Structures are given as C-alpha cells and as structure tokens.
Image (tube, helix red, strand yellow):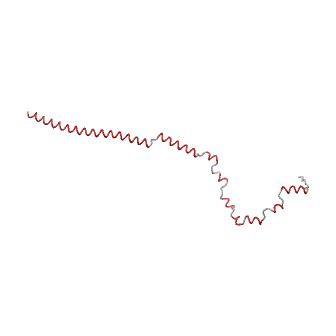
C-alpha cells in the first residue's frame, strides 16, 4: 500500500474549516450543561426500554395483517349499496307486496261473499219449498179422504 502524504497549507485548512465542523464550532453547540436543561434523568426514564420495544409488533407479526392488495378484494360501500338495491329490486319483482296481498285477500272475501249469499238463498228457498210441500201434502190428504168417502 502506498501512502501519499500531502501537505496542507493554512489557506487550505481555512477553506476546509469553513465547510466542515471544527472542535471550536462544536463547543458552541449543545454542552452537557445545556443538555441537562432539555433532558433530565426523569425525562429519560419515560422513554421506551428494550422490554417495552419487545412488546411492539414485529415484521413477522405484521405479515398476518391485510395488505393493500388484500383490501382491494373486499367489497366497497358502493358494491354493498349496489348489492342491496339488486336484492330489493329482485324481491319486489319476485315476491308479493303488501298491496298485492291485500288485493288477494279482498278478492277472496268477494268470492266468499258470493258463495255465502248463494248458500243463504238456497236455504231460504228450501224452507219455502218445504212449507209448500207440507201444504200440498195436507191438501192431497184432504182430497184423498173426500174421495175415499165417496
């Protein structure tokens, strides 16, 4: 290995000291006395310890969580809204609505009313016919008695 030694002139050192931090410059920065004002021992005790950091999630722990690509596969609010609207449209077109059921009920009661009216009229007619048959039977008996006597 060949070492090249280079002599620096004072002018070179001045130029370099303008660019780089020197010991003299560093002394004007934060000293131990200054640091005690900014950070006390009690403040330092509030920082996280190695044991505290062990309880945080590691890279392996984070691998179990969903990634951006995973989340892209989930349904969005718009997707769910569309699905709900589709289900409502399908059910409105497939299943009977309350109005449909009320109309159906009304139609059934109208038919039952006609049927009950027919039955009631039929019973009244049978009652009238039964009285007529009794009256005619009484007349036939009277006529048979009159004819039997002669």
In the image, 27 versus 58, the foreground residue is 27
Q: Quadrant of residue 55?
A: bottom right
Residue 38 location (% of width, % of height): 73, 64
Residue 9 sits above or below residue 128 on the image: below
Residue 15 location (% of width, % of height): 87, 55
The quadrant of the picture occupied by the C terminus is top left
How many numbered marks appear?
A: 0
Q: Observer-nearest residue: 63 or 9?
A: 9
Residue 126 located left or right of residue 73:
left
Vertical relation: 39 (above or below) 3: below
With 60 as the anchor, is 133 left or right in this view? left
- Quadrant for residue 143, please give it: top left
Side (left or right) of 94 relative to 3: left
Where is residue 96? Give x, y as percent.
44, 41
| Rendered view: 150 above or below 102 | above
Left or right: 45 in relation to 103: right
- Residue positioned most to the left: 150
Question: Where is residue 115 drawn, in percent x and y?
Answer: 32, 39
- Residue 35 figure quarter: bottom right
């Amino acid at each position: 290995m060949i070492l090249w030694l280079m002599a620096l002139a004072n002018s070179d050192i001045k130029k370099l000291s303008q660019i780089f931090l020197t010991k003299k410059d560093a002394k004007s920065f934060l000293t131990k006395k200054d640091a005690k004002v900014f950070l006390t021992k009690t403040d330092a005790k509030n920082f996280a310890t190695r044991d505290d950091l062990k309880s945080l999630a590691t890279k392996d722990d984070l691998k179990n969580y969903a990634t951006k690509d995973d989340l892209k596969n989930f349904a969005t609010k718009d997707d769910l809204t569309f699905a709900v609207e589709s289900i409502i449209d399908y059910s409105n077109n497939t299943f009977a609505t309350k109005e449909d059921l009320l109309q159906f009920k009304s139609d059934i009661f109208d038919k039952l009313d006609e049927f009950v009216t027919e039955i009631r009229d039929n019973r009244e007619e049978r009652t009238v016919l039964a009285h007529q048959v009794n009256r005619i039977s009484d007349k036939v008996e009277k006529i048979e008695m009159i004819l039997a006597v002669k």
